Each structure stands twice: as structure tokens, then as C-alpha cells.
């Protein structure tokens, strides 16, 4: 397969490396080459089996509009743009595109979501809190993953109020801790990404999965199929 990776940041570079390790051809476009999605023309997009976006919230919206409007298959790991989600899903449906998005493409984080739901049911009277830490260059806070953890907890137990504390320091790939606390004890679930490769592996598998498909999915819906 031939993949287009949007974004020359640290995660984008790792994704390109992993895709090549999987035997795929890869082309990478940085922001300077694709301002306002100007490079994403119909003739250019036709040559790719899937487009993988790990850019910024602002760039991702323009990229999605261009790719989905041309019926491309697209994997979006950028977060911070979800107020446009309904519009993007609708665009994908109208144009017979393939659209796969997610707050976190780590398989371990998908397991974390399931455990968070179970914990919310198991100790419904405890106080819940999420602590998340990412690298200083991450622009959105709270992280999309932290928001998804809160959604998982509150879907399982709508009565729970879950606070999120965010930190942006150094080059941390990602740490998420879910606390459930009572007067007498503390339960913690923790996920720590040691490198961006955890996200890159999931993103490449997602691109392999969506090639040739039409529809819109959250990564959590299909992660167990990879």
C-alpha cells in the first residue's frame, strides 16, 4: 500500500518509519508544504490507499475537509478538533469516504478505557479524578485521551463527576492516571507511553484496515479487529 502521512513532527516521523517497516510506501507532507491543505488536490490524493493525519487541530480540520471531500480513506490521530466531528462524519458519508479517528491509537489505552468503565461500576461512591501529562508542545489540554477516559467513566456511571488535571512538561509521550478515592483507600489505573511508537503502530494498522472501506468509525470501535 501507499500511505500519505501529514505532519513532520515527532509522531509523524515515527509513523512513516513504522509504515515502511510494514512494507508500505510512504510520502510525508509537512505543514510548510501543505498550508491550508493546498497540496491535497484530487489528482494527488488518488494515488494513496490512506492518509494519516498527526498535525495540529487547525491543520487537521482543513486536511479532513480536503481529503474527505475527495472520497479519500483517512486516519486522524490529531485531537482538539472534535467540535467539528459531526460535520466531518457527514462529509465522509456524502462523499463515500473512509474516516477513522481517535483520541489515542495505542492498543493499551483501549484496554484502559474498558478498565475505567469497570471501575466506575465497581466503586460508584468513590471520587474520581484524571491526571494527564504530555510534552510541552502539545497544544490541547485536557488531552483527547483524558476526555475519552472521562467519557468512559461517566458513560458507565453518569452520576460521577470527574475532574481532569493537565500538565505539559518536557518531552513526555503521554501519562494518564485515573484515581478512584474514598476516605480510606485509593485505587489507581495508570497508562504510560514510553515512546510515540505505541501510537504509530496503531495508526499504521488502522490505515491498513481502512484501505478500501467506506464509512466513519472511532478507533475504539475497531481496535479489537487489528
Image: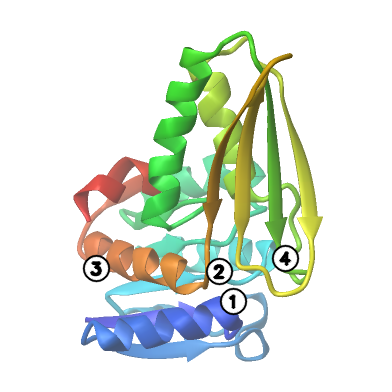
> Earlier along the polypeptide chain: callout 1 or callout 2?
1
Q: Which mark is residue 208?
A: 3
Q: Nearer the viewer, mark 4 or mark 3?
A: 4
> Earlier along the polypeptide chain: callout 4 or callout 3?
4
- Of residues 153 and 86, which is closer to you in this image? 153
Dots 1, 2 in contact, CB < 8 A: yes
> Earlier along the polypeptide chain: callout 3 or callout 1?
1
Residue plotted at (64% across, 32% down): 179
The secondary structure type at the circle numbered 4 is loop
Residue 127: x and y in percent read: 70, 19
- Of residues 42 and 153, which is closer to you in this image? 153
Task: Using the numbered discs, state the Cα–Cα distance from disc 1 to disc 2 in whole angstroms.
Answer: 5 Å
Dots 4, 3 in contact, CB < 8 A: no
The residue that disc 1 covers is 37
Q: Nearer the viewer, mark 1 or mark 4?
A: 4
Q: Which mark is residue 138?
A: 4
Task: Using the numbered discs, state the Cα–Cα distance from disc 3 to disc 2 in whole angstroms.
Answer: 19 Å
Q: Nearer the viewer, mark 2 or mark 4?
A: 4
The secondary structure type at the circle numbered 2 is helix
Task: Using the numbered discs, state the Cα–Cα distance from disc 4 to disc 3 in whole angstroms.
Answer: 27 Å
Q: Nearer the viewer, mark 3 or mark 2?
A: 3
Task: Using the numbered discs, state the Cα–Cα distance from disc 2 to disc 4 in whole angstroms.
Answer: 19 Å
> Earlier along the polypeptide chain: callout 1 or callout 4?
1
As drawn, 159 above or below 12:
above
Residue 63: x and y in percent read: 55, 69
Q: Which mark is residue 63?
A: 2
In screen coordinates, is 109 left or right of 214?
right
Amino acid at each position: 500500500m501507499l500511505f500519505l502521512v501529514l505532519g513532520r513532527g515527532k509522531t509523524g516521523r515515527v509513523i512513516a518509519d513504522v509504515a515502511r517497516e510494514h512494507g508500505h510506501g510512504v510520502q510525508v507532507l509537512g505543514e510548510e508544504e501543505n498550508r491550508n491543505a493546498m497540496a491535497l488536490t484530487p489528482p494527488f490524493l488518488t494515488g494513496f490507499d490512506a492518509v494519516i493525519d498527526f498535525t495540529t487541530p487547525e491543520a487537521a480540520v482543513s486536511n479532513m475537509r480536503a481529503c474527505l471531500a475527495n472520497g479519500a480513506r483517512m486516519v486522524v490521530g490529531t485531537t482538539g478538533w472534535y467540535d467539528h466531528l459531526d460535520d466531518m462524519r457527514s462529509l465522509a458519508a456524502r462523499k463515500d469516504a473512509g474516516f477513522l479517528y481517535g483520541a489515542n491509537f495505542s492498543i493499551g489505552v483501549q484496554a484502559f478505557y474498558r478498565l475505567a468503565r469497570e471501575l466506575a461500576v465497581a466503586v460508584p461512591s468513590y471520587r474520581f479524578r484524571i491526571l494527564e501529562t504530555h510534552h510541552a508542545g502539545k497544544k490541547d489540554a485536557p488531552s483527547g485521551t483524558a476526555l475519552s477516559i472521562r467519557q468512559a467513566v461517566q458513560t458507565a456511571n453518569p452520576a460521577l463527576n470527574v475532574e481532569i488535571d493537565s500538565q505539559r512538561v518536557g518531552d513526555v509521550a503521554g501519562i494518564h492516571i485515573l484515581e478512584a478515592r474514598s476516605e480510606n483507600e485509593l485505587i489507581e489505573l495508570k497508562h504510560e507511553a514510553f515512546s510515540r511508537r505505541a501510537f504509530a503502530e496503531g495508526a499504521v494498522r488502522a490505515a491498513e484496515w481502512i484501505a478500501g472501506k467506506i464509512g466513519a468509525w472511532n478507533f475504539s470501535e475497531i481496535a479489537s479487529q487489528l
